[in-house]
Structure formats: structure tokens, C-alpha cells
Image: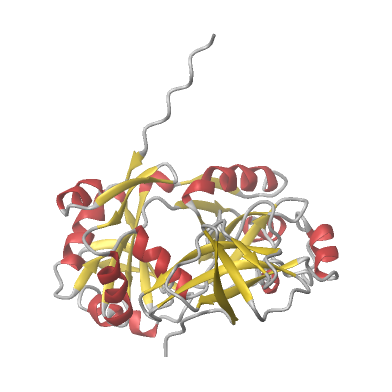
Amino acid sequence: MPAEPTPAEPKTTPLHDVHRDLGANLVDFAGYLMPLRYKSETAEHQAVRTGAGLFDLSHMGEIFLSGPDAGAALDYALVGNLSPMPVGKARYTMICAPDGGVLDDLIVYRLADTTWMVVANAANADVVRDALAERAAGFEAAVDDRSDAYALVALQGPRSQAILEGFTEAPVGDLKYYAVLAGRVAGVDALIARTGYTGEDGFELFVDAADAVALWRALAAVDGVVPAGLAARDSLRLEAGMPLYGNELTAETTPFEAGLGRVVKLDKTVDFVGKTTLAAQAATPPGRRLVGLVARGRRAPRKGYQVVTSGGTPCGVVTSGAPSPTLGKPIAMAYLDSGVEEADLAVDVRGRPEPVDVVPLPFYKRS
């Protein structure tokens, strides 16, 4: 019999030694050895809500498109209308399969007239790169995966602007949400983006991989800046109602089911990949919808748990769930079958119904 394939060793980010020295609990996430937590995930979560947290996001993919037709290629490849976007702006969008399923959700930055950066989730970076290369083949545009060349450090929280201003002369105070500029931060060249995945104000700093340690150490030395891991990142994004690929979004999920139909620009003139199917989906009420759930008790709904009616009939499934440090209650996002009455629902938590209330998303919105 053929030998079983040897599992690939997880990759490490340029900040791996820093995380190890800080005593982080390291786990394999999307093929990378990443910090789950350093000490207390609740403390890390609360630091971002009240002060500032520092994240290593260097596992994310950075894929560049350049050339005279780069904007047109993106209009064809993605569901958004990217070519009219001004230089220095960013946009949340998706890349979909011809059948309308979501291959990944993305942030696209326009860095120059003919240069764009597409940031993909780590687990999907290869899929996105290959799909972009295939879809850009008929355009005068080059696709260049620079993921290994870049590190990405995120500074998130209400103190993030004040802290960052101490390390750069770039006008970060004038930078709008979903915008980007080039500048030097703590002595290293960076792309400074006012974006994030926590529901707080904050910045994502793209730097050369060789500069990551110097940048991290400079920011982490500020009193009150707390290194934060994947666990806090997940609870923060859940409170903010932000989808996670593999949970709320999959290749079997359409943007309309996820409540993200607004990112599908059916009115753009380009016959983009998936347009016909997505147009039909937009014209038909989806068979399920993404909702927020707040548990009345203390047991947290978790991914994969069934949502049930008062009679015990399955009517949905939880996609993400956890105790909310900010709300003090367990919360979850779930797909609920269309037509189901939202009153008297429960989540089957290990054989016992946990009553829940259906609430609008997001659970938390900063003032």
C-alpha cells in the first residue's frame, strides 16, 4: 500500500520568535503557526475595546495586480466595481465562483493608477491568486503574489491613532476609514491602512517581512499596548458581526444569504464572473438568512450546533458562537431557514435546548 502523505509542517511568520518569547500559545491556523493567546484572551479582547491591541496578521495573502488593465481585470474577476475607486482608497469585496459561491472575501487597495493590492484570507490565498491569474489572462495586467515578502501588523483600539502618531509623520489623523497611504512608521517603510477586523478604530500596517520585528517591538513597548491572539480576534469580530470565511462564508454560501448582497455590483457594465447566477439569486429570496443570537443562559452556542423551534424541529445552524466579554452573555451568528418564526427558538447545546433571542447584527458598534 502507498505510504500516507506526511502532513506539511505549518509555516511561521516573521514574528514567530517574538511570539515564542512572549509565551504565546501557538496553534496551526490556515497552515501557519499563530498565537492563539498570550495570557488571557479576555484581557486581550478588553484591551482592544478600551485601549489598544497588537496583532500579527502576517499569514494573510497580499496579491498585486498591475498594468493598464488592472482595474478592468478586477472588475471582471470580482463582484465589486473597483476601477472607479480613487488611489488611496480600499474596498471590501468578494471573489465568487461561476455558481455564485463565495471563494473568499477580500479587501482591495488602490495604491497607484495602475497598481492594486488584494488582501486574501490565508487559507484561500492560493485559490485567490490562481483565480485572479486565470481571470486576468485576457487583460493587460500582471498578477504577482507577494505574500511571503510582506508582514502585516494590526494596531486596533480607541488609542490606536494617538499611539501611531507617536511613530510616524504621515497624516494618519486625516486618513479616512477604508483608506491607505504610504509612510514611515517607527523608522520602517509601511503601507498604513485604516482598516481592521475588530469593530474598533485601528490600522493595519503592511511592511517588508524583514522589518516586522522592529515595528512590533516599537509598538509593543508603548504602555498599555497588549499583544492579542487569534482568540481575541475571533471574539472581537463576532461582536462586530463580521463574517469569517469557513464559518459564515463558504463556497456553498452566496453573498445574499450572508446579508452581504450590497457588495455585489450588478449594475456595473462588466459581465463579471458569476454575474448571471448572482443576478438570479438577487431576484429570489434566499432560503436562509444570517442572524444574530443572544443566549438567555450561560451556555454558549458553538459552530455546528443546531437551532431548533420550541417543538424541537431543526431550523438553522450556528456558524460562530462564544461568550461575549463586552456584552457579558453568550452570542452567536447562525443561518436561520427563511419563514421560521423568530420567537421561542433555542440552540441544541449538547442535547439540551438553550433559549436564544434573535437580534440584529452587529452585537456591538463603537460610539
**Number of marks drawn:** 0
Q: Residue furthest bottom?
A: 367
250 sits to left or right of 15: right
Foreground residue among 327 and 192: 327
Query: Which quarter of the rendering shows the N terminus?
Result: top right
- Please determine whether, in this image, residue 186 is positioned above or below residue 51: above
Residue 107 in view (yes/no): no
Residue 131 position, x and y percent, is: 64, 45
Residue 247 position, x and y percent, is: 56, 57
Q: Residue at x 57, y 45 (%)?
A: 129
Q: Residue at x 20, y 64 (%)?
A: 187
Residue 31 position, x and y percent, is: 42, 41
- Please determine whether, in this image, residue 31 is positioned above or below residue 84: above
72 sits to left or right of 5: right
Residue 27 in view (yes/no): yes
Q: Residue at x 63, y 54 (%)?
A: 250
